[in-house]
Image: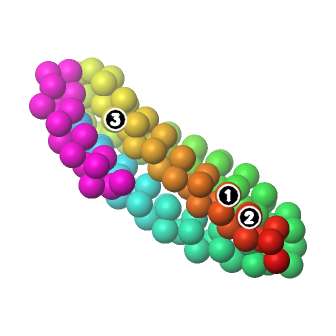
Amino acid sequence: MTIILMVILLAISYLPPFKGILAISFVSLAFFIALSIIVFYLGNAAAKSPNKNRLTQLIMILVFVKLFCCLFIIIIYDRLFEPRTNFYVLPFILIYIVFTVFEVNMLSKANRLTQQT
């Protein structure tokens, strides 16, 4: 999935409105990869927890943390690089959506394992 995203990002970066998106694209890609690894381990730990609400609590916390971090990344990029257009947000949103779907799938599997035991 990451390789496909990298190819798409590289292809998009050659289009005129998306020149200069590689910096934020690869930073956000690295952020979401790291976040997915953390979510995987936390989700498995929460699924094995005797507290049945632990997974729900984790999901709620992750939504707020991810939202805050995403806004932080976009604001920092905008302040540091002062891009001419706002098209740099579109690849970021693409990465966000792909990794959110991946994380939801991962946490759903962890939840199913919890319900089976």
Q: Residue 38: x percent and y percent? A: 53, 69
Q: Is residue 28 left or right of residue 46?
A: left
Q: Residue 59: x percent and y percent? A: 70, 55
Q: Is residue 48 left or right of residue 88?
A: right
Q: Are marks 1 and 2 in contact (CB under 8 Å)?
A: yes
Q: Earlier in the sequence, mark 3 or mark 1?
A: 3
Mark linked to residue 112: 2
Most common SS among magenta residues: helix
Q: Quadrant of the N terminus?
A: bottom left
Q: Quadrant of the C terminus?
A: bottom right
Query: From which residue to which does the magenta span run?
Result: 1-19
Q: Is residue 64 above or below residue 18?
A: below
Amino acid at pointer 1: Ser
Cα distance, mark 2 to mark 3?
Answer: 32 Å
Q: Which residue is the site of mark 1? A: 108
Residue at 86% x, 68% y is 52
Residue at 50% x, 62% y is 36
Q: Residue 61: x percent and y percent? A: 70, 55
Amino acid at pointer 3: Pro
Q: Which residue is the site of mark 3? A: 91
Give whichever of 3, 28 is nearer the camera. 3
Nearest to viewer (mark 2 / mark 3):
2
Q: Is residue 43 above or below residue 96?
A: below
Q: Are marks 3 and 1 in contact (CB under 8 Å)?
A: no
Residue 91 found in image quarter: top left
Cα distance, mark 1 to mark 2?
Answer: 6 Å
> Label 3's element?
helix
Residue at 43% x, 35% y is 93
Q: Is residue 64 above or below residue 43?
A: above
